[in-house]
Amino acid sequence: MGRPVQYNTKIKIVKMPDGYTGEGFFATSFDKVVGLARANSLWPLPFATSCCGIEFMATMGSHYDLGRFGAERMGFTPRQCDMLLVAGTIAKKMAPILRQVYLQMAEPRWVIAIGACASTGGIFDSYPVLQGIDQVIPVDVYVPGCPPRPEGIIDGILKLQDLVHNESLRRRGSEQYKGLLESYNIQ
Ligand code: SF4
């Protein structure tokens, strides 16, 4: 006999952006609507090379279920993703490939460094290991731990959601942002 179908009856609706409400209308700014949509529909691109990747797999699994935050649609093509999750040790030989993946993502794109290795090289303070992915690409959120537990990864994604939610639509065209990319030799 098949198992009874279980429906999720605890659906949580995201908070409405600030605005003006009246009889039959709600008005807010375009920035806020776009921020709300972007923050709750992040498409992850996992770049997992070692142990932290296993924690990420657990984060995607049914117990932790990243789908609760609108980020269950994993993509394995950079062109369809906007959240790059780097989990694991990155060898210097791999750095140009990571950078290439980043460059293939369309703007707006965000990056999370998951765990000590991706953030700083971790315990591998040695010549073949990149001492932090921010040496080759800009990073938005760092998740500490060796490895971070799935709760830590979820916390990092929530922090990124907060950042995305409040990001100005003008940021990507600003001189500061262009300057940031130029500091990485990215046009
Ligand atoms: S931070 Fe620790 S758990 Fe994560 S990839 Fe490095 S050694 Fe492995």
Image: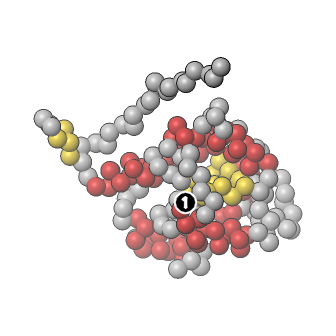
Residue 116 placement (x, y as % from top left): 74, 51
Residue 127 placement (x, y as % from top left): 86, 68
Residue 61 placement (x, y as % from top left): 66, 38
- Look at 55% across and 49% down and name the residue there: 73
- Look at 65% across and 19% down and name the residue there: 1
Residue 96, quarter of picture: bottom right
- Look at 75% across and 45% down and name the residue there: 54
Q: Can residue 142 be seen here?
A: yes
> Does 140 appear above or below 21?
below
Residue 60, quarter of picture: top right
- Look at 79% across and 48% down and name the residue there: 51
Could you tell whether 21 is left or right of 90 in the image?
A: left
> Does 56 appear above or below 34?
above
User: Considering depth in this image, is 164 or 72 the residue closer to the camera?
Assistant: 72
Number of numbered labels in the structure image: 1
User: Considering depth in this image, is 187 or 43 the residue closer to the camera?
Assistant: 43
Category of crowding for the residue at label 1, using alpha-carbon neighbours closer than 10 angstroms: few (below 14), some (14–19), many (at least 20): many
Most distant residue in the left direction:
23
> Does 86 appear above or below 146?
below
Secondary structure of the residue carrying tag 1 is loop
User: Considering depth in this image, is 30 or 129 the residue closer to the camera?
Assistant: 30
Q: How is the image coloured?
A: secondary structure
Q: Can residue 144 be seen here?
A: no
> Does 33 appear above or below 175?
above
**To which residue does mark 1 refer?**
81
